[in-house]
Image: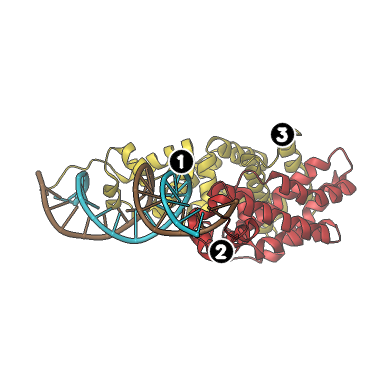
Chain colours: A yellow, B red, C cyan, D brown
Amino acid sequence: MPTPDRTSLAEIVDAGRGIVELGGLSKLTMQAVADRVGVRAPSLYKRVRDRDALLTLVAEASANDLADRLEASDGSLGALAHVYRSFAQRHPEGFRLMFAVDGAEAAMARASVPLLRATSEIVGPDATLDAARLLTAWATGFVNMELSGSFRFDGDIDQAFEYGLERLVAGLRAG
Amino acid sequence: MPTPDRTSLAEIVDAGRGIVELGGLSKLTMQAVADRVGVRAPSLYKRVRDRDALLTLVAEASANDLADRLEASDGSLGALAHVYRSFAQRHPEGFRLMFAVDGAEAAMARASVPLLRATSEIVGPDATLDAARLLTAWATGFVNMELSGSFRFDGDIDQAFEYGLERLVAGLRAG
DNA sequence: ACCTGAACACCGTTCAAGT
DNA sequence: ACCTGAACACCGTTCAAGT
């Protein structure tokens, strides 16, 4: 006798995203997810292999979300950088998870397409990959340090971001 | 009747560093540390408040280690960047922990002194902080992406690092 | 076919009792 | 003064038994 489904994979991943954004990775327990979707913890294993697989799914959902917003921008380097940073500020835990977890590479690759397009216009085809790595590394490092409070409180962080973006573009054009 | 000490805080922190470097953060359990220093897990709480405090101590030890090596370099921007990257490659888990943990700020500040000195020579006093943040963000982001395998395998990663360093210096000088 | 309670291994942490 | 066994709460995961 079949039982009607009491939840779904999408609902579970959504619950995971909500919990992690609310309380950080350590609050993302199978029990917490089960509570939120109205089921007992063992039932989750019907849809998800284990907690690690759930983390990967949450990271992938974040990466796809980010990719959508980057694609919806005007595609300029400045726009991409600002969308990237504001996504990280709005979804700090999902953003962190994208880099902390293995298996989200495909979704991350999607997010880098608009960047490759923008950099190739500035530096030409030969340096596109190196330039994109320079920009991603900077933006990712900057935002991660901002999120983790590494910047302390002295100085204007918005201004530091604009300064970095400006000097980077200058450096790329000088090449 | 006093009992002779069977371990010490330094030994515990060292054990923590060894374990985390060997098997990642998830293997750094109180039990594993206790086993390594030859004591039962509850005894660790005589020297360390809890696991989080131990993580902070491990992160601080890493940051001080890094600061020592940066200070021992010739102080040029290129030397600092290469020392930074090679430290991360040799102690990937300790490096990650420095940014993942709260409370290691003082030790991290020590590590940034040589960088501030080098950048102020290039961009002058007004832009020193912004420029140092640009460089740290880039180097940290680059190395983290390298460690987490975000760069995939296409392209030459060493060359991408040199390219980034060169373009950054060009951008700073153009200011 | 999905859901559950019960169970197991493991972990962080506390504490009374030992020396 | 440090160390320990015992205990507790919590977590991930498995599985036989329910519907």
Task: Report which residue position mark 2 lands on.
Answer: B37
Q: Is residue A37 left or right of residue B132?
A: left
Q: Is residue B103 left or right of residue C6?
A: right
Measured from the top left, where is residue B147 in percent x and y? 60, 60
* Crowd band around label 1 with a 10 angstrom C-alpha radius: few (<14), some (14–19), many (20+): many
Task: Report which residue position mark 1 lands on.
Answer: A20
Identity, as a three-letter code, of the amino acid under mark 3? Phe
Q: Is residue A11 above or below residue B111?
A: above
In three-dimensional space, the C-alpha distance between marks 3 and 1, rounded to whole angstroms, equals 26 Å
The N terminus of chain B appears in which quarter of the rendering?
A: bottom right
Q: Chain of mark 3?
A: A
Quadrant of residue B19 in the image? bottom right
Measured from the top left, where is residue A61 in percent x and y? 44, 45
Q: Residue placed at 54% from the left, 47% from the top?
A: B50
Q: Chain of mark 1?
A: A
Task: Report which residue position mark 3 lands on.
Answer: A153
